Image (cartoon, helix red, strand yellow):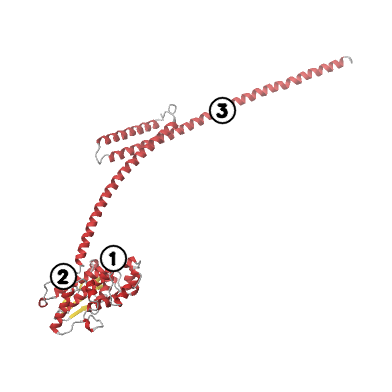
Amino acid sequence: MDSLNPNRSKFSRTIQKVIHLRTPAKLVNHCGKDSITSHKSKKFHQDDDADDDDSKLRSRAVLQALVAKLFASGSTIKAGYAEMQAAQNPYNIEAIQVADEAVVRELRVISELKQSFLKKQLDMSLSVPQVTFLLAEIQEQQSLMKTYEITMKKLETEIDLKDSHIDELKKRLQECNQGNKMMEKKLNSSGPLPILDNLKLSVMNSNHFCQVLHYAVRSIRRFVKFMSSEMESAHWDVDAAAKAIVTDTALAKPTHRCFVFESFVCRAMFEGFTSPNFSLSESSSAPEGKGKQRRLLFFERFKKLKSVNPIHFLSQNPRSPFGKYVRAKYLTLVHAKMECSFFGNLNQRKLLNAGSYPETAFFAAFAEMAKRVWVLHGLAFSFDAEIGIFQVSHNSRFSEVYMECVTEEAFDAVGGDVRVGFTVVPGFKIGSSVIQSQVYLRPAATVPADS
């Protein structure tokens, strides 16, 4: 028994080794099979998910291509309509037919796409969405370019028409300006008054005075225009200048500033009008004599100066009564600061103080105005009647007997109740005859009640 124990023990150990070795192999084989099976199942599921993602991406690409195709068709239709409109003028039947066919073709394409989309019959297998999308983009860009080209041609045509119209208007404006200059030259010329060429002292009346007054007022307005232009060139605050002259009346329009400056010039030029020597310090300024003889002297002064060029007359007669009047009125009306602002110096003032006369356009306009007022003064004292001049007070009621309005807007006031803002051109009295003053009116509502 003892001799058999070692062998038994050896055999037992051998059997145990064999059993021990086989058991893990089985386990390994079984585990390996399960792992492979699980891996294959997982791979199949991943393939299914990938197919779903590809299908979704493809569907999205098809829809994007569909939308791009719709926009491209819309742009093509828009371009077709633009072509039809452009072909209307000038009328081109062939271009209209081609554009109409293009519009109808694209409308059919849109209709087919709509039906396919609603019936879910979009062909996603035969078409390539990316290519369709790019082709639609190209079609849309081509249609937009065509639309822009048509629009550009239309605008170019309109520009040509506008340019032609502008050229025509420029030509008409030039003709009007030339006509205005000729008329202005005639109105403001230093030539004689044709109506009064054969005027005699014995037949004079207030109508003759009115004609010469209008002759003088035209030159005043021309000088005011000249002065306003110089103010703007010198960068004056023209509104502030007007308000400094007339402080108690608001102007209805900015363009009415000219009436303020006209009023300022008239006050200066007509000051002393009722005095035989125009209130100048030199007594020699007025003709000597009395009664009819004196009237004849004034009348001769009127006839002599009404047809002369004032600059030529002043250069030949620097010490004449008219020269003294021109010098005094210029120094009164044109302040030294104004002259310096306009011209950068006081040369004109210095020449006048030295007994000479400037040869500038500004002084020429002033001299012409002064001559006409001087002529009017001579005619006034040729009448065998008392001479009077009057200004209308601020806030006075309007009277057609003594006044006429320089603007028509004031009469649009409610109830027609208007008041005088300021006098522009003074009125005159020759005996019992009244020559109306020219006034600037404002509605009564704008004037304080206690005025």
Q: Earlier in the sequence, mark 3 or mark 2?
A: 3
Kindly report which numbered mark, 2 or 1, lies closer to the viewer in this rendering. Answer: 2
User: Is any atom of residue 105 visible in this view?
Assistant: yes
Find residue 45 and name its label. Answer: 3
Kindly report which numbered mark, 1 or 3, lies closer to the viewer in this rendering. Answer: 1
Outermost residue to the front: 316
Q: Which residue is mark 1?
A: 255
Give the CA separation, mark 1 to mark 3.
90 Å
Amino acid on which the number 1 mark rests in the picture? Thr
Give the CA separation, mark 3 to mark 2.
116 Å
Q: Secondary structure at mark 3?
A: helix
User: Could you tell me residue 75's position as x and y percent?
Assistant: 36, 38
Q: Secondary structure at mark 2?
A: loop
Above or below residue 222? Residue 38 is: above
The one of 29 and 421 positioned closer to us in this rendering: 421
Q: Quadrant of residue 396?
A: bottom left
Q: Which residue is mark 2?
A: 193
Q: State if disc 1 and disc 2 touch (CB < 8 Å).
A: no
User: Could you tell me residue 219's position as x and y percent?
Assistant: 23, 70
Neighbor class of circle 3 (other Cα within 10 Å; few <14, some 14-19, many 20+) is few
Q: Residue at x 23, y 84 (%)?
A: 283
Q: Residue at x 83, y 17 (%)?
A: 10
Amino acid on which the number 2 mark rests in the picture? Leu
Outermost residue to the bottom: 290
User: Is any atom of residue 260 visible in this view?
Assistant: no
Q: Quadrant of the N terminus?
A: top right
Amino acid on which the number 3 mark rests in the picture? His
The one of 127 and 309 positioned closer to us in this rendering: 309
Give the CA separation, mark 2 to mark 1.
31 Å
User: Could you tell me residue 421's position as x and y percent?
Assistant: 27, 72
Neighbor class of circle 2 (other Cα within 10 Å; few <14, some 14-19, many 20+) is some
